[in-house]
Amino acid sequence: MESTALSGARAQRRTWTSTRRSLAAVGLALGVATMLSACSLPAARPQASEPPAEPGISREAAAELLNAVPGLTLANVGSHISGLSTEAVVEVYVDDDASILAPEVLDYVLRVGWATEMPNEPSILGLTVRNNGTTLDLQPQAQELTGGANLESAEPFSAYLDAPADYLGDWPGAVPTPPAV
């Protein structure tokens, strides 16, 4: 009888060991299958009727776009850290104040700055426009253009947006169409 009980315990132990091995093998197979399926999932592709937006351009490309606008020269787009915030800074020179005063030109310059790729999303957008060494004050025009969306004092900038996403949308923004001037 003792021998029957001992062989029954051994059989039960073998069954339990076999079950554990089977469960481990199934778990391993599921894990491998999950990893392989994640690697081979096709990426979603835009439909031909929906061209992808073109957010994010290099600083060099942004400067080229701005310099291509008649009356704007020596454009530069950059960024710096101010406290805990990243600030996008657009600088441009004009020979004639009227070159930047057209609302569509000012809007274009702000949007090109917002479309520029930077290490971190800027929470501030500053624009400096200079004519013969003088920084132009464009804050009233920027307030009118943006509906006064979170604008602070422009000093030392020409225009200053302290919450540019409120007016310009998600960053980096789509590359705008050049203004008709």
Image (cartoon, rainbow, N blue to C red):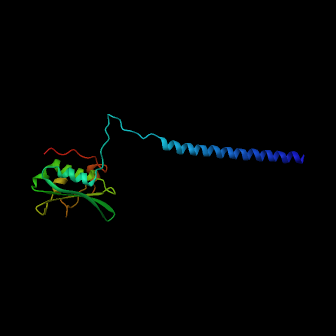
Q: Residue farthest to the top?
A: 49
Residue in the image at 89% along x and 48% along y: 2
How far across and how far down the image is residue 86, in percent? 31, 60
How far across and how far down the image is residue 161, in percent? 24, 56
For the C terminus, which image quadrant? top left
Q: Residue farthest to the bottom?
A: 83
Residue 155 visible to the viewer: no
Relative vertical location of residue 46 with respect to residue 163 in this rendering, above or below: above
How many labels sit on residues?
0
Left or right for 5, reference 61: right
Q: Residue farthest to the right?
A: 1
Residue 14 visible to the viewer: yes
Relative vertical location of residue 118 with respect to residue 52 in this rendering, above or below: below
Relative vertical location of residue 142 with respect to residue 43 in this rendering, above or below: below
Q: In front here: 166 or 2?
A: 2
Q: Quadrant of residue 140?
A: bottom left
Residue in the image at 10% along x and 52% along y: 98
Q: In front here: 140 or 176?
A: 176
How far across and how far down the image is residue 177, in percent? 21, 44
Residue in the image at 70% along x and 44% along y: 19
How far across and how far down the image is residue 135, in percent? 14, 62
Left or right for 100, reference 16: left
Residue in the image at 31% along x and 38% along y: 51
Q: In front here: 96 or 42?
A: 42
